[in-house]
Amino acid sequence: MVKIEAIVLAAGYATRLYPLTENTPKPLLNVAGKPIIEHIIIKIEQINSINKIYIVTNDKFEQHFKQWLKDFDSEKSIEIISDGTKSNEDRLGALGDINHVVNLKNIENEIIVIAGDNLFELSLKDIVNFFKKRKSNVIVLHDVKDFELAKCYGIVEINNNIVINFEEKPVSPKSTLASTGIYLFPKKTISLIKKYIAQGNNPDKTGNFIEWLHKRDVIYSYVTDKKWYDIGSIEQLEKADKYYKQK
């Protein structure tokens, strides 16, 4: 069985959610009685081929995650990795963090990358099956069905399920398909991640890399209509909490 490494991005400083996130990392905020990160890990655990879960955080919140992990029992091996940053100003960015983990752990397997502040109902098993059949990069999308709302997200244009454009928070969105912060990369893409960083490209958002990558390799889209929350505001956090409590 081909092994997949999971990288959960949890190194942001979530300044938009202050004061909630001033002393607590966003993925450790509770939704329906348990931290956001636990909802995500439960989904990852359903993938049989997961080798290990790496949670990449920052120097400020590393101990918060290590303390949380002491009391959390997972079916998969979990490792907390600090990217060494101490503030929003010196953060490595999402792609910088992926590259940091890949280099630190000499990762050569396939990778699933998940933003640590998103909640989703879709099955990651289904996405992995889709990925294995296509043997290429996959981005998971959700149709927000509103062009005004689309201005808040990374927006993707597709043709025959293949990504032809990606734009971060566009002023005039060309579609309403938003990135959910879930990506699958085959082994061959690891060298491209390293190349992207080495060339001095913007490491802040994974979407910046997707925009660069789709011109060099095929990226398939997996569009889901299942419930998805991007916890970017207190309002979204409250909506997610209400929904998951009802469940």
Image (cartoon, grey):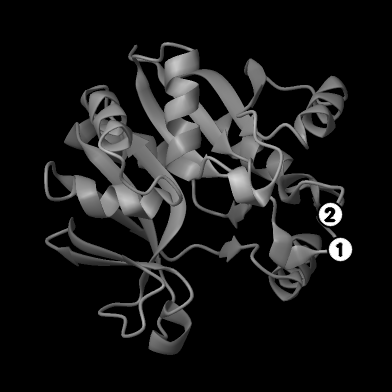
Q: Residue at x 30, y 32 (%)?
A: 193
Figure quadrant of the N terminus:
top left
Helix, strand or loop at disc 1? loop
Identity, as a three-letter code, of the amino acid under mark 2: Glu
Residue 7 in the image, given as x and y percentages of width and height: 51, 31
Residue 143 quadrant: bottom left
In this rendering, the answer to whether 247 lies above or below 217 is below
Q: Residue at x 35, y 16 (%)?
A: 109
Q: Nearer the viewer, residue 238 or 81?
A: 81
Residue 236 in the image, given as x and y percentages of width and height: 69, 71
- The residue carrying pointer 1 sits among few (fewer than 14), some (14 to 19) or many (20 or more) residues within 10 Å by Cα, namely few
Figure quadrant of the C terminus:
bottom right
Q: Residue at x 29, y 25 (%)?
A: 190
Residue 198: mark: none
Report whether 96 appears left or right of 177.
right
In this rendering, the answer to whether 144 lies above or below 71 is below
Report whether 19 appears left or right of 11.
right
- Between the C-alphas of marks 1 and 2, the distance is 5 Å
Q: Residue under circle 2?
A: 22
Residue 83 in the image, given as x and y percentages of width and height: 60, 29
Report whether 117 appears left or right of 105.
right
Residue 204 in the image, given as x and y percentages of width and height: 46, 50
Identity, as a three-letter code, of the amino acid under mark 1: Pro
Q: Residue at x 74, y 60 (%)?
A: 244
Residue 60 is at least partly visible in this image? yes
Q: Nearer the viewer, residue 90 or 106?
A: 90
The number of numbered badges drawn on the structure is 2
Residue 116 is at least partly visible in this image? no
Q: Residue under circle 1?
A: 19
Residue 14 quadrant: bottom right
Question: Contact, CB < 8 Å: mark 1 with mark 2?
Answer: yes
